Amino acid sequence: MRITDARVVVTSPGRNFVTLKLVTDGGVTGVGDATLNGRELAVAAYLTEHVVPVLIGRDPARIEDTWQYLYKGAYWRRGPVTMTAIAAVDTALWDIKGKVAGLPVYQLLGGRSREGVTVYGHANAETVDDVLVEVSGYVERGYRAVRVQTGVPGLPGTYGVSTSEVYEPADAALPTETAWSTEAYLAHVPSVFARVREEFGPGLRLLHDVHHRLTPIEAARLGRSLEPYSLTWLEDPVPAELQEGFRLIRRHTTTPLAVGEVFNSIHDCRQLVTEQLVDYIRTTVVHAGGITHLRRIFDLAALYHVRSGSHGATDLSPVCMAAALHVDISIPNFGLQEYMRHTPETDAVFPHTYHFADGYLHPSEEPGLGVDLDEEAAARFPYRPAQLPVNRLLDGTVHSW
Ligand code: CS2
Ligand code: MG
């Protein structure tokens, strides 16, 4: 069997997605997500110029060899663009392998370790009263875990609080600017969780995303002030380039920590995992080198009692979600999966058979990943430039977004 064609498709059914579709001489096809929010065309060019030419004629069965070829062969290792491109190839090859075997991909990964994939939804609103309504909506729909974000009094808008029905931070061709005050934020957040716990009791799992905005000691303070509300995790409390910075947070709080949505390799996770500085690793298929590399990360994590918590925002396509669910259902150390629903246009461009029921997502039972790219539908939604915002402190200093 040989790869005869590799198409890189950029489409924007509500937001931009990059997809790689591999075609084989036997007629079997495979898809991989290659979306890197705000930098989509960089990955598309990397694939088109440097990867597609070396794929033509290759044996699609050789997943590991192809991964090593693209990783070691590039010489320039790691980085989000390279690893997203490799992820797309790897995911598409697993899809093909599943279809050839006549099995859903999770069966090739060792089969089920659980009945369903527990997901968390996003309750966000400007005011605490409104967020309580949002949380109860998720509870009614059967969710067991909810991420809670609200506006911060005194700030015009805050990360994680959407103004439209579908959350979309990449909102303009040139970055919009947002404002931030750590002092206002730290003063407000504990009161939000006090209200949510009071209203919903101890059974509901609660999460919160800091989106890399604090220093280690500020994060330690927040973690400690949230201890009475028993969060399942506090996400991305600080930018994680400084992995040893998490030691400082750990010394002061027992609030569990989750990190990793911007990581692209096992090396970004290594110290955090082996020193047990975090509790959940949130890398996912599309940004961490595909199913092959993600499993390597989760296997390392399992040795240190660290669980998975895969990123599942709307800027990861249904192809990534389909692949993530096959990993989630099979690994021993699954923690939680983020789930934000896509627009109906996106669902139409990426027909899939994974589904939500009773707080769980269930992976497809079809051979392969159980997701496809409808290329005709995709062609109806041309690329629209869109970038993520830039964040500034109230005095104008550029801060992490
Ligand atoms: C986020 C993302 O889902 C999350 O936890 O932090 O929404 C993130 O902002 C986007 O994926 C950025 O593209
Ligand atoms: Mg996040």
Image (cartoon, rainbow, N blue to C red):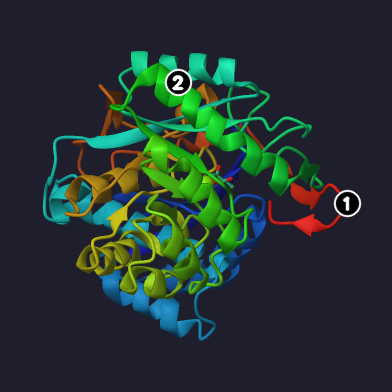
Judge the density around disc 1: few (<14), some (14-19), many (≥20) Cα neighbours within 10 Å: few
Quadrant in the picture for residue 140: top left
- Residue at point 47% right, 59% down? 287
- Ligand 1 within 8 angstroms of badge 1 C-beta: no
Location of residue 178 in the rendering, given as x and y in whole percent from the top left corner: 78, 42
**In the drawing, does residue 255 fall left or right of residue 356?**
right
Kindly identify which residue carries mark 1: 395
Would you say the residues marked 1 and 2 are in contact, meaning their CB atoms lie under 8 Å apart? Answer: no
**In the drawing, does residue 202 fall left or right of residue 400?**
left
Q: Circle 2 sits in a helix, a strand or a loop, which is it?
A: helix
What kind of residue is marked 1?
Answer: Asp
Could you tell me how many numbered marks the image carries? 2
- Residue at point 54% right, 65% down? 240
Assign the N terminus to one quadrant of the image.
bottom left
- Ligand 1 within 8 angstroms of badge 2 C-beta: no
Inspect this view and state whether residue 174 appears: yes
> What is the number of the mark on residue 290?
none
Q: Considering depth in this image, is 21 or 321 the residue closer to the camera?
A: 321
Kindly identify which residue carries mark 2: 135
Q: Considering depth in this image, is 284 or 177 the residue closer to the camera?
A: 177
Quadrant in the picture for residue 192: top right
**In the drawing, does residue 328 fall left or right of residue 7?**
left
What kind of residue is marked 2?
Answer: Val
Q: Earlier in the sequence, mark 1 or mark 2?
A: 2
Location of residue 78 in the rendering, given as x and y in whole percent from the top left corner: 50, 75
Q: Considering depth in this image, is 49 or 275 the residue closer to the camera?
A: 275
Judge the density around disc 2: few (<14), some (14-19), many (≥20) Cα neighbours within 10 Å: many
- Residue at point 54% right, 48% down? 222
**In the drawing, does residue 154 fall left or right of residue 189?**
right
Q: Residue furthest bottom?
A: 75
Q: Circle 1 sits in a helix, a strand or a loop, which is it?
A: loop
Location of residue 63 in the rendering, given as x and y in whole percent from the top left corner: 28, 68
